[in-house]
Structure formats: structure tokens, C-alpha cells
């Protein structure tokens, strides 16, 4: 019952976000600020993690290819498939749910605790539109991060493969090109748009409706991360079944 | 005039406001007083429309809150100014940005017109060189002044203040009290203050509503409070020896 009530409140919140829009010049500035904070602010950590995960995928694939009949270009193929299909859209989203989600929950939660949201409401501002809408729009640029994670992840795999002498550079590149299905990239971008909406809205929900003091802001951030991750994992399964099944 | 009739509010089984009826008049500083847990904050949040009441009516110059649409409520809120207990200034904005915020949101004024208006209200609250500072860089008393400036920048008809003196030293508290009273007279607005500061009660309480356990126990002026024989309010107001002596001196002078 408690969960059903929370889902209902979340749906109502999402509807309210799109009502009574804030004046465009103000909204434009808010969106640009959020793009800087949520998208550009996350590039460093995503690039760093992607390089190493791509490298690890390549090494682990190489170490498991003990049969000489299996061609070495499978390392590149497996790295590409892992990175494009799962690592870049899903694993990155879990990281973003932690990094961006906790920022969203704590910033909105702090505004709740310090009555800044009440101040907005008393002024007649649609506080949900003012606070959450720019985050949703900024997160529409999330596929841009996923694209970079794909590129950098495969690049990391190539470096690890070549530096570890698992196969030649030409074999790895050949594997990357092998049986390439462009829809897999589209599938990955579709997932990332859905996950972006989740990363923007679930932490906002937990921050906006939190009760208590400073300690509860931390708790709300943790709960928001857990629920964002759970929803991302479930939606990942559903979208994969729908789009690739 | 703000007219409250038979206001009820409960949370689950707990009845917090039990049929409050009162009025708040123009040009007066109205104080809501009472012990912690008496329902003051809930009453104010109902007046502000931040909480929906269960029963009764609240009318703002004839506009009944419960029958207004969402857009009408937001329009009405633009006639309200609020000074929160913790000031509730936006951390990410400068003092100037905070005060200018309602103008940016709800008017089509040019940048220079908005700056002029901000300068006027910041001067009015005696803040001159703080425009570019952030809330974290100014004192609690200055934050309260910024909050007052932000609350009056749109020329509101109704000004609400939730414990405007909390956390301030006695001198600053008196300055803030006097400022609120001056603004009330100057702009001829309805001011409602939530307080349990006895200095405020004595100094600026032109109308005082005393709440006890969600019931309006007493209503009167700061002069009436000396003469009343209502046990609940005398126990609350004259809980300290100093105030007991002040009251005795006042009664002796009157006699």
C-alpha cells in the first residue's frame, strides 16, 4: 500500500512538473546551469570509468579464449557488444544515479529543509516546474554521455588488448567491425533516454517530498539511489525484452 | 481583511486546529502567540495555503481560498509576502538576486527598473552595501532584512512572518520588530506574525491571538493583555518574574 501510494505521488509530481511553466528567460538559464552541472560535470568520472571497464572487458575476454580455434578478433567483438549494449547505457546510468541522483536529492532536499521550496510556493511559483523541469531537459543530453562512454570504453579495450599483447591491433579493430548492427546503438540510446528521465525524476521526488532535517537529506539521497538503481535494472530488462527479444 | 471562520485542521487522529474564528485587519500588526505545539505554525501554513484545512473558511478580501482554482491561488499568492523563520533565502543567489527574484518571475520590468525597485526596498530595510553578497556571507539579522525586502518587493497586501526574531540578539530583534511595524503602516498592509517573543507581543501586538491546544483561547491588544484575567494567557505571558513585575507596575500605574 505504501509503495502504491508512493508511485501515485510520483505520477502526480511528474504531471505537476509540466504545469504552469516558468518564464522562458529564467528557465533557459536554469536549463543551461543544469546541463553544466549534470552533464558536463559528469564527463570526467564517466570517461575515467569507461576506459578501465572497457579494458577489463577486453582482458577478461582474452583470458577466457583458450581455444586456438576461436579467432582473436572475438576480443574486439565482445568488447564492442558489452560496451554498446550494456556497459555504456546501463552501468553508466547506475553510476549517474549515484553521482547526479544524490546531487539532485540533496539540493532539492536541502531547499525543502530550509523552507526555500515553501518560499517559492508562497510566491506563487510552481516549485516542481522550477526545480525539476530543467533537470529533466538537461538529462535529455544524457545520450551524449552514453555515446562518449561507448567510444571511450572500446578505446580502453583496444589499449588493454594491445598493451597486454592479447591480439594485434588489426584483429581487435576487425572484431569491432564484425557483424555490426546499428540498431544496437539505437537501442542503447533509447534505454539511455528512459534512464535519464528516471535519474532526473526519482531523486527529485525523494528530495521534494522529504521530511525532517539535515540527517534525513542524507537518508533521502541513499533511498533515491537505491530506488533509481532498482527501477533502472527493471526497465533495462523490460526494454531489452521489448527491443531485442 | 483576512477572515477566518471555524477553521479545523487535523493530522490523522490528532486535531491540531479546533474551530478558530478571527479576523486580521489592514494596517495592523497581528500576532499569533502560544506555546510550542499549540498550532501556531499549522495555523499560519493554512493562512498561506501551504496546508489545506479540513473545515471552515479563509477569505482574503472576500476571496475564499477553498473555492479558488490552482491558477487563482497562485495569483492570490502574488499578493502575499512571507518572512520565514530561517529566512529561506535562495543560497545560490546574491542578496540582489533574492530580492529581484519575484520581479523576474512575475513582472515584465526591464533590468534597470528591477534594479531600481530592489535598491528602494533594500534601502527601506537599511541594507545598503550587501547587494552582491550571498546569504551565507551575511549575519542572521541581515538575512532577516533581506527576507523582509524580498517579501515586500512586489507590494504585497498581506505580509506573514514566522518567528521573525528567532535567533537574533535583543537589539536586532527590536529593530526587526519596528521595521515590520513601520512597513505595515507605510504600505497599509495586513501583517500576521507568528511569535512567542514577549517583547514583540508588548511592543507591536496591535492584535494578539493566543492559541492553546489548537483553540483560540484569547484575543485582544497589547494593552488588554495587562488587564486580562484569562488564566491561560497570564500564565503564558507572565511566566517570568520580570514580566510579572512589569504587569504589576502597569496595573499600579493604571490605578
Image (cartoon, coloured by chain):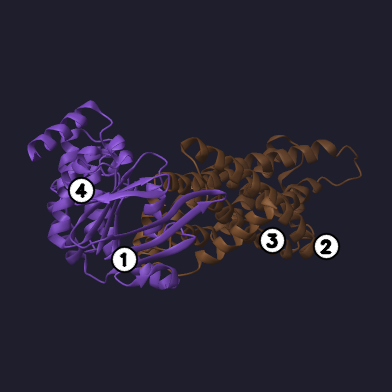
Chain colours: A brown, B purple
Mark 1, residue position: B78
Q: For the residues marked 3 and 2, what is the alpha-carbon distance in whole angstroms?
A: 16 Å
| Tag 3 subunit | A
In the image, residue A38 sits, relative to residue B104, either above or below, namely above
Q: For the residues marked 2 and 4, what is the alpha-carbon distance in whole angstroms?
A: 72 Å
Q: Is residue B147 left or right of residue A37?
A: left
Q: For the residues marked 1 and 2, what is the alpha-carbon distance in whole angstroms?
A: 53 Å
| Tag 2 subunit | A
Label 3 neighbour load within 10 Å: few <14, some 14-19, many 20+: some
Q: For the residues marked 3 and 4, what is the alpha-carbon distance in whole angstroms?
A: 69 Å
Element on which disc 2 rests: loop
Q: Quick check: marks 1 and 2 in contact, CB under 8 Å?
A: no
Q: Are marks 1 and 2 on the same chain?
A: no
Label 1 neighbour load within 10 Å: few <14, some 14-19, many 20+: many
Mark 2, residue position: A245
**Residue drawn at 73 percent across, 53 percent down:** A234
In the image, residue A206 sits, relative to residue A63, either above or below, namely below
Select label 1 or label 2 by which is in front.
1
Q: Quick check: marks 2 and 4 in contact, CB under 8 Å?
A: no
Element on which disc 1 rests: loop
Residue B205, numbered label: 4
The reply to whether residue A108 is in sight is yes
Amino acid at each position: 500500500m505504501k509503495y502504491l501510494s508512493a508511485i501515485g505521488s510520483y505520477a502526480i509530481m511528474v504531471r505537476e512538473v509540466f504545469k504552469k511553466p516558468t518564464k522562458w528567460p529564467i528557465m533557459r538559464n536554469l536549463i543551461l546551469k543544469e546541463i553544466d552541472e549534470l552533464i558536463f560535470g559528469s564527463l570526467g568520472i564517466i570517461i575515467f570509468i569507461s576506459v578501465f571497464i572497457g579494458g577489463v572487458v577486453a582482458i577478461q575476454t582474452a583470458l577466457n579464449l583458450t581455444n586456438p580455434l576461436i579467432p582473436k578478433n572475438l576480443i574486439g567483438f565482445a568488447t564492442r557488444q558489452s560496451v554498446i549494449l550494456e556497459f555504456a547505457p546501463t552501468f553508466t546510468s547506475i553510476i549517474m544515479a549515484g553521482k547526479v541522483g544524490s546531487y539532485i536529492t540533496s539540493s532539492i532536499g536541502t531547499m525543502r529543509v530550509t523552507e526555500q521550496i515553501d518560499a517559492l510556493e508562497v510566491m506563487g511559483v510552481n516549485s516542481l516546474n522550477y526545480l525539476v523541469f530543467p533537470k529533466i531537459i538537461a538529462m535529455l543530453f544524457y545520450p551524449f554521455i552514453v555515446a562518449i562512454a561507448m567510444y571511450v570504453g572500446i578505446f580502453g579495450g583496444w589499449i588493454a588488448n594491445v598493451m597486454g599483447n592479447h591480439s594485434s591491433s588489426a584483429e581487435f579493430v576487425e572484431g569491432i567491425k564484425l557483424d555490426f548492427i546499428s540498431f544496437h546503438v539505437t537501442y542503447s540510446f533509447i534505454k539511455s533516454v528512459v534512464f535519464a528521465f528516471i535519474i532526473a525524476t526519482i531523486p527529485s521526488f525523494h528530495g521534494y517530498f522529504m521530511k525532517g532535517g539535515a540527517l534525513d537529506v542524507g537518508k533521502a539521497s541513499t533511498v533515491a539511489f537505491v530506488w533509481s538503481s532498482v527501477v533502472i535494472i527493471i526497465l533495462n530488462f523490460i526494454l531489452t525484452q521489448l527491443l531485442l527479444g | 481583511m483576512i477572515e477566518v471562520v471555524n477553521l479545523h485542521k487535523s493530522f490523522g487522529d490528532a486535531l491540531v486546529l479546533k474551530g478558530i474564528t478571527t479576523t486580521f485587519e489592514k494596517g495592523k500588526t497581528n500576532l499569533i502567540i502560544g506555546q510550542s505545539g499549540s498550532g501556531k505554525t499549522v495555523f499560519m501554513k493554512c493562512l498561506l495555503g501551504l496546508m489545506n484545512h479540513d473545515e471552515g473558511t479563509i477569505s482574503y478580501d472576500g476571496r475564499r481560498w477553498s473555492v479558488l482554482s490552482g491558477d487563482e491561488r497562485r495569483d492570490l499568492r502574488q499578493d502575499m509576502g512571507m518572512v520565514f523563520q530561517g529566512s529561506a533565502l535562495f543560497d545560490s543567489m546574491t542578496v540582489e538576486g533574492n530580492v529581484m527574484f519575484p520581479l523576474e518571475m512575475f513582472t515584465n520590468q526591464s533590468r534597470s527598473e528591477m534594479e531600481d525597485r530592489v535598491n528602494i526596498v533594500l534601502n527601506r530595510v537599511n541594507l545598503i552595501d550587501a547587494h552582491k553578497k550571498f546569504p551565507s556571507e551575511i549575519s542572521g539579522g541581515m538575512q532577516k532584512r533581506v527576507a523582509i525586502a524580498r517579501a515586500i518587493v512586489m507590494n504585497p497586501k498581506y505580509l506573514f512572518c514566522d518567528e521573525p526574531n528567532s535567533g537574533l540578539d535583543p537589539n536586532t530583534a527590536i529593530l526587526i520588530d519596528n521595521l515590520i511595524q513601520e512597513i505595515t503602516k507605510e504600505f497599509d498592509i495586513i501583517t500576521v506574525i507568528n511569535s512567542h517573543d514577549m517583547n514583540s507581543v508588548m511592543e507591536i501586538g496591535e492584535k494578539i491571538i493566543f492559541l492553546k491546544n489548537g483553540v483560540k483561547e484569547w484575543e485582544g491588544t497589547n494593552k488588554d493583555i495587562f488587564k486580562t484575567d484569562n488564566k491561560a494567557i497570564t500564565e503564558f505571558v507572565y511566566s517570568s518574574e520580570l514580566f510579572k513585575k512589569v504587569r504589576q507596575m502597569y496595573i499600579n500605574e493604571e490605578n
